[in-house]
Image: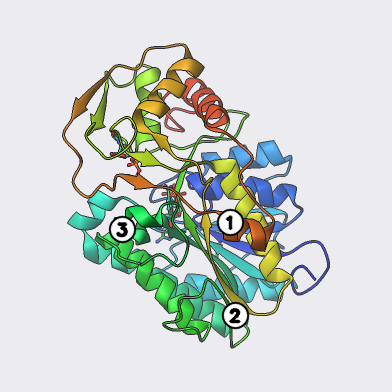
Amino acid sequence: MLGDRDGSMAQLLITGGAGFLGSHTCLVLLEAGHQLLVLDDFSNSSAISLERVAELAGVPLQRDQPTLKATPEAFTLVEGDIRDTQCLDALFASAKAFGQPIDAVIHFAGLKAVGESVQQPLRYWDVNVVGTQRLLTAMNFHHCRTIVFSSSATLYGYPHPNQIPIPETAPIQPINPYGASKHAAEALLADLAGCSGKPEPIQASSGGWRIARLRYFNPVGAHPSGRIGEDPNGIPNNLFPFITQVAVGRRPELTVFGDDWPTPDGTGVRDYIHVMDLAEGHREALHSLLNSDPQLLTLNLGSGQGASVLGVVKAMEATSQRAIPHRIAPRRPGDAAITVANPTLAAQQLHWRTQRSLTDICRDGWAWQQDNPNGYGEACL
Ligand code: NAD
Ligand code: UDP
């Protein structure tokens, strides 16, 4: 059974649904026939992404308040903060009052910049840990006990070379406040499931909780339409948006952080996963939870393939037919040499694996960057 009410459609709360990963996942979930309530405070996004998701899905975007003035339609947007308990309670209670109780939550809302987390650890713990705890409290009170949580491969810290590709059972050793906040939220979810301190990635859970902790590797790219994509604030910290901004002429050159890593070409290796593959992974994780006994799943979402910095530069040069000027600089503090997922468990458990290649990632990311050189900033709908 999907959801608590009928066989095909669930009422879902998507926190942080206007962001990069949330917007693409909203589209996939709308296409799967679900009804979505998005809660976002727009601290790192705008409603334009969701207007475009609505256009791609062919449904109207309804805007409402946490108290819901109207029956939720297929796609409803509510502005609010996950730390606001009144807002959360109003949302769960009103959806129920309209006969559409929230069946499950996909929890993307959070802060994600490693460097910023070092400067502002209290803020990161507040949003990522306190915010998650308040969301879970509201869910528990309103008897909604199914959640897909955005975790991160950053939990693996500096993985040991013997553990590449990284299995879910690899040691958890966060090396910055962002990673620590994700670790704390993961621990809270394990406590709720009655699985405290148990390392197995698939466990029966107690108290009716169905939980998926999805550890993302490096999500990049964009929807193939070029209408939605990643829109980082200011100078991108991450490789992929930096490269596309160099290719489009918004930045003069890429700085390559180290060419003396123990990797084939000396530059850092990562597991880049197309954002649409990641979005489909969420759909499959949700369906798996809704159709199973209460359990706690902990799964890597990655391709299992590594690409080096220079490999990504070459792939983007081939796609864009433009040179990407770059210069080698010292290693960036806190970087690991290689981070690549072992994606076997997700394949077994969800019957999901990545479908799209680095070439697809570059093609779609480049289309988004070309059509939206300033992201959503100066966008007309
Ligand atoms: P994003 O910043 O684009 O999206 C996050 C969304 O949450 C934004 O729309 C933001 O406005 C919203 N938000 C932030 N704080 C909020 C609050 N207090 N209340 C309500 N809304 C709030 O980030 P993303 O790349 O889409 O990442 C989504 C999730 O996935 C985050 O939890 C992030 O830590 C995690 N994650 C991301 C990556 C990545 O590389 N993008 C990798 C691993 C994990
Ligand atoms: N990187 C780089 N220049 C940049 C940004 C990143 O050389 O401007 C490298 C970085 O050192 C790492 C890889 O690109 O080897 C991926 O970095 P990103 O920040 O995108 O992801 P993460 O390090 O969080 O996996």
Query: Would residue 123 be found to the left or right of residue 84 on screen?
Result: left
In the rendered image, which residue does mark 1 sit on?
Answer: 344
Residue 215 percent coordinates (x, y): 47, 58
Q: Residue at x 38, y 51 (%)?
A: 43
In the rendered image, which residue does mark 2 sit on?
Answer: 209
Q: Quadrant of the C terminus?
A: top right
Density class for disc 2 (Cα within 10 Å; few <14, some 14-19, many ≥20) is many
The answer to whether residue 85 is above or below residue 62 is below
Query: Which mark, residue 157?
Result: 3
Element type at marker 2?
A: loop
The answer to whether residue 132 is above or below residue 362 is below
Element type at marker 3?
A: loop
> Which mark is in front, 1 or 2?
1
Q: Residue at x 64, y 56 (%)?
A: 347
Residue 130 percent coordinates (x, y): 36, 73
Query: Which mark, residue 335?
Result: none
Density class for disc 3 (Cα within 10 Å; few <14, some 14-19, many ≥20) is some
Q: In the rendered structure, which disc, 1 or 3, sits on the residue that comes first in sequence?
A: 3
Q: Residue at x 39, y 32 (%)?
A: 241
Q: Residue furthest right?
A: 7
Residue type highlighted by circle 1: Thr
Density class for disc 1 (Cα within 10 Å; few <14, some 14-19, many ≥20) is many
Residue 247 or 107: which is nearer the viewer? 247
